[in-house]
Amino acid sequence: MTRAVLTLNAGSSSLKVGLFPATGDAALATGLADRIGPEGVLKLKDAGGTPIAAAPGDISTHAGAVRAAIDSFAALYPDLQILAVGHRVVHGGDRFEAPVRITEDILQQLDRLSPFAPLHQPHNLAGIRGAMASFAGVPQVACFDTAFHRRHPWVNDAFALPREMYDEGVRRYGFHGLSYEYVTSRLAEIAPHLAAGRVVVAHLGNGASMCAIQNGRSIASTMGFSALDGLPMGTRCGQVDPGVLLYLMDQKGLGAAEISDMLYKRSGLLGLSGISNDMRTLEASDRPEAAQAIDYFVFRCQREVGAMAAALGGIDALVFCGGIGENSRLVRARICERLGWMGIEIDHTRNAANAAVVSSEVARTTVMVVPTNEELVIARAARAAAGLTEDAA
Ligand code: AMP
């Protein structure tokens, strides 16, 4: 009998699926359904990372993609028993500080948070409803991207807007919490003296943010009310002057849907370069617009490392993760280039090798690369819901 937990991470048109054993960190299989809709595709890998064939299925909906992934996993492990399902949920509001076992009442509470994350939350909840239908009676757990930040100080929770806006939930929630939770737990294993100190984690991927973490706890983050604020991203704008939005409405006559499309899908690296949202493509391009987009990304990262270090009253370690943070030696080196004043100094040989520690021997501040693993954080929460302890199995 292969006893396992399932992890589901549903985006607007994509779905990541993971199958994890009852204990241990390595996935038994993973899947990514992309462009969910008429042209949806499902790609799967086995425990060794080798691509495997997907079972025939309809990838035009999230529920169809979940079904096809599960059928494929069942073909790989014919004696598969799913003990629990863990879900990534983007918004837990001001209430959820930890993973929660999903009931009909919890689902209704999460539904009420959809206006805060209209592009993501409804898809997360559709994934949960699909899994509840497929696995009746199996524990389902919601893991929140906002939870890691819930106890940050009030000055990092509020905007300087009229008080009633705060009271109705217009707050700096912060996101990428599952990634920060994983990196924090990993740091406690590999560098406990740093984990107990002041750490800035830079999650740089297609989505990007930074978090100031003191002794394992989030103090401040670059993302705020939505996943748009802070750093520029693949297609999202990052921080902009709110006056720009007033101009777009008043002078250009744009409505909420058009502005949302611009800020979420046509800005960031794609908007600046006019070429691509993908850092690899921009690094390989010799067009000046590509170089400018990278310059802007690097500059905003440098500024925010400074801001996060100020929130912490200093910095003991800078940790890179996410697709860009883990793989782009160029972006890491360029961000660190101007941070010598905070004791940051890159060792170029280590950096070129994507080593775990990429700072020089003599640097006052340690710079590290810690590959993130949001799926494992969800799997651990699912195991806990199934009553599995790390040494059960
Ligand atoms: P993620 O959303 O975490 O999967 O990260 C995706 C981003 O990581 C994209 O912009 C990729 O171009 C970037 N990325 C992945 N590998 C590399 C690499 N070797 N060099 C530069 N960027 C990379």
Image (cartoon, rainbow, N blue to C red):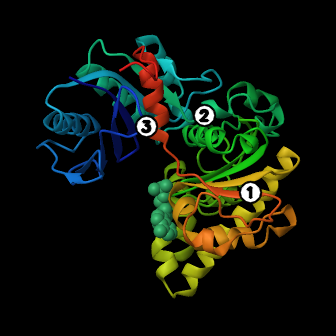
The quarter in which the C terminus is drawn is: top left
Amino acid residing under circle 3: Asp
Q: Which residue is mark 2?
A: 146
Q: Is mark 1 within 8 Å of ligand 1?
A: no
Q: Secondary structure at mark 2?
A: loop
Give the quadrant of the N terminus.
top left
Q: Which mark is residue 25?
A: 3
Which circle marks residue 62 in the picture? none
Q: Secondary structure at mark 3?
A: loop
**What is the CA distance from the residue labelled 3 to the residue labelled 1?**
26 Å
Residue positioned 15% across, 50% down in the render: 53
In this rendered view, identify the residue nearer to me: 216 or 290: 216
Judged by depth in the image, the label closer to the viewer, 3 or 2, is: 3
The residues bearing labels 1 and 2 have C-alpha atoms spaced at a distance of: 27 Å
Which comes before the other along the chain, label 3 or label 2? 3
Residues under numbered marks 1 and 2 in contact, where contact means CB atoms less than 8 Å apart: no
Q: Is residue 380 visible?
A: yes
Residue pointed to by mark 1: 366
Q: Is residue 275 left or right of residue 95?
A: left
Q: Position of residue 145 (x, y in %)?
A: 56, 36
Would you say 1 lies left or right of 138 here? left
